[in-house]
Amino acid sequence: MSNSFDVLWLNASPILKRFDEPLLKYLSGYISVAQWEYHQTKDEASSIDQAVELVDEFLECRDRPVHLAGHGMGGTIALSYARRFPQKVRSLTLLAVAAQPANNWHAHYYFQRQLFQISRELVLASSVRSLFGNQPPHITKKLVAALDKDLEQSPSSHSLFKLVYLPKGGVSMPMMVCGSKSDPVVNPPALHDWLNWFKPEDKLWECPEGYHFFHYFYAEQVGKQILSFWKCHHPHPLEASALSLSTSTNYQ
């Protein structure tokens, strides 16, 4: 199975993976895509390093490099993997990942909890507006519940006691960084900071709208940009493909 796809999409949040689906459906019409998912229980420690090890276990039988991609924390894991195992990555595509990779929505949530004496529920409701824009009350309620669960399930190392930082810098393989001009989490300055480490073959693209989950609201527009990037770094022409794999790796 590890040789039957060209792209590996990393997802670090089972509860939020639904927002990846429109983009993955579009991409899988042109290139074979596999999905890797990270799962953990409440009693397990969060660890990006452990997630990287699990990705490598999944790819250990693969005999050629893969296009690696991910959004948010999934992109952070992809970045960490690409730095550790560069020979296994053909290209790296990051969506909503700041040049300081730890600067994610979890960090913003915990920073607000530290700064203001307001409840978890109110901060999560504020996070919904930041990540998705203004939503009807019944949708906001569902999104608050999803974000609440993501705080428990994602391998983020942030907490109320400490905000962590990860190494900044680029990678050796071609890299594409995508963001949204209306994303208050990975805002334009945080995105443009990547340019300090860009190589000539690297690419930065910004979606005009869409907040943090711009790839959900503008799947086709984002997908066209990513396919154009992959086309420049793929060993053979991209053609329509009916193959779309879904592979889950459980961390238990």
Image: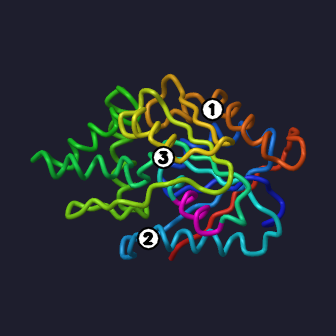
Residue for badge 2: 47
Q: Amino acid at mark 1?
A: Val
Comparing marks 3 and 1, which lies closer to the viewer?
3
Q: In the displayed structure, does residue 231 sit left or right of residue 144? A: right
Work out whether 93 lies above or below 192: below
Q: Position of residue 195 (x, y in %)?
A: 51, 40
Residue for badge 1: 222
Q: Amino acid at mark 2?
A: Ser
Magenta-drawn stretch contains 102: no
Residue for badge 3: 97
Q: Secondary structure at mark 1?
A: helix
The Cα–Cα distance between marks 3 and 1, rounded to whole angstroms, is 15 Å
Comparing marks 3 and 2, which lies closer to the viewer?
3
The local crowd at label 2, few if under 14, some if 14 to 19, many if 20 or more residues have their Cα within 10 Å, is some
Q: Nearer the viewer, residue 188 or 24?
A: 188
Q: In the displayed structure, does residue 191 sit left or right of residue 158? A: right
Magenta-drawn stretch contains 84: yes
What residue occupies the far top of the structure in this picture?
208
Disc 3 or 2, which lies upstream in sequence? 2
Q: Which residues are magenta?
A: 77-85
Work out whether 46 lies above or below 194: below
Quarter of the image with the N terminus is bottom right
The Cα–Cα distance between marks 3 and 2, rounded to whole angstroms, is 17 Å
The local crowd at label 3, few if under 14, some if 14 to 19, many if 20 or more residues have their Cα within 10 Å, is many
Disc 1 or 2, which lies upstream in sequence? 2
Mark 1 and mark 2 residues within 8 Å of each other at the beta carbon = no
Disc 3 or 1, which lies upstream in sequence? 3
Q: Amino acid at mark 3?
A: Val
